[in-house]
Amino acid sequence: MSDLHIELTRGWDLPSGDARPDFDVMIVAGDLIPRMERGVAWLLDRVRDRPVIYVAGNHEFYGCDIDRTLEKAKALAAGTNVHVLENESVRIDDVTFAGCTLWTDFGIRGDAHGAMAVAAERMNDFKRIRMSTYKRRFLPHHAVNRHSKSVTFLESEMRKPRGEDKLVVVTHHASIPEMTSGPGGSGNDPTLDPAYRSDLRRLMVPAPDDGRGALRPAELWIFGHTHESFDAAMIDASTIDATATGATTRVVSNAKGYGPWLPRERAWDNQDFNEKLIIEI
């Protein structure tokens, strides 16, 4: 699941007790709450008996230094069942989980520089996130640099031999261009699409050894950020099909989004959000 936005939620919590589904690993693909260390504390208070994979969304960095809050989150999670991943992986039984925020390259519509200018003007990411020990604002070109490093990391994980083991990628930003943009979906200004997603379909199909090993795609790629539900599989580098079987990478999003705003309301952005979603790989 992703985009729980606890800071903007009233009267909702994770299912507990008999209502909690039986799962092996919980995945939180970002935007749990601003200041990531608070997210770790929230998870530790609710899930102590299962591993939790947690990657930061853009909202985890609001009101703080992007690297400092990651450091605090990792320090708090150290030695616990919560695994904070940023260009890092962890192996649990026969599955490797590789995670990062991902950001984007702003390039899905061709004019990356234009998209960066629009995002800088209109998105809170580039007004409310600081870096360099609070000395500088986080800007679109910083996001592009981080995106490039994350793509390199993810590709390196896919080119590692893993035998019968499986690989699950967890990112906050979307990795396929089919998604619509932003909270509320396609009703948003499409000029902001490039700030929500990039096109990484090339990493979802096999590729030959280029000196770094053959690329074996992840069996599953989980993302958030768009406040939409999505579940489909890559057939080839340009085709994705919700009914495909035996394909390469299954791509899944299960985002709650903002709300409920009042305890008596059981409504949030994504009406298809499933708080008990189980994915088997």
Image (cartoon, grey):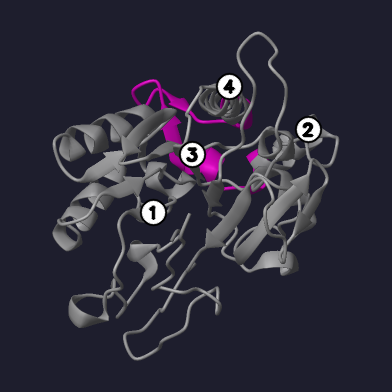
Mark-to-mark CA distance, 3 and 2: 19 Å
Q: Which residue is at 67% across, 39% downward?
A: 204
Disc 2 residue type?
Ala
- Whether the magenta-drawn stretch holds residue 210 is answered as no
Res 201 quadrant in image: top right
Along the line of sight, which residue is nearer the eye, 255 or 25? Answer: 25
Point out residue 241 in the picture as x, y percentages from the top left corner: 76, 60
Quickly name the residue at label 4.
152
Please say if 276 is above or below 41: below
Label 2 near label 1: C-beta < 8 Å? no
- Closest to the camera, between mark 1 and mark 3, is 1
Q: Is residue 257 left or right of residue 11?
A: right
The answer to whether the residues at label 3 and label 2 have Cβ atoms under 8 Å apart is: no
Disc 4 + disc 3, Cβ < 8 Å: no
Residue linked to disc 3: 101
| For residue 37, side relative to residue 279 (left or right) | left
Q: Is residue 103 something that shows in the picture?
A: yes
Q: Cβ–Cβ below 8 Å for labels 2 and 4?
A: no
Which residue type does callout 1 highlight?
Val
Kindly identify the amino acid type of the residue bearing the numbered disc 3. Thr
Instruction: Specify the label residue 28 is tagged with.
Output: 1
Which mark is nearer the camera, 1 or 2?
1
The span from disc 1 to disc 3 (Cα, nearest Å) is 11 Å
The segment highlighted magenta reads: 120-142
Sequence-wise, the earlier of marks 3 and 2 is: 3
* Mark 3 residue crowding within 10 angstroms, few (<14) / some (14–19) / many (20+): many
Q: Position of residue 130 (x, y in %)?
A: 42, 32
* Residue at the extreme bottom: 264
Q: Is residue 192 above or below residue 66?
A: below
Q: Position of residue 124 (x, y in %)?
A: 54, 48
- Marker disc for residue 112: 2
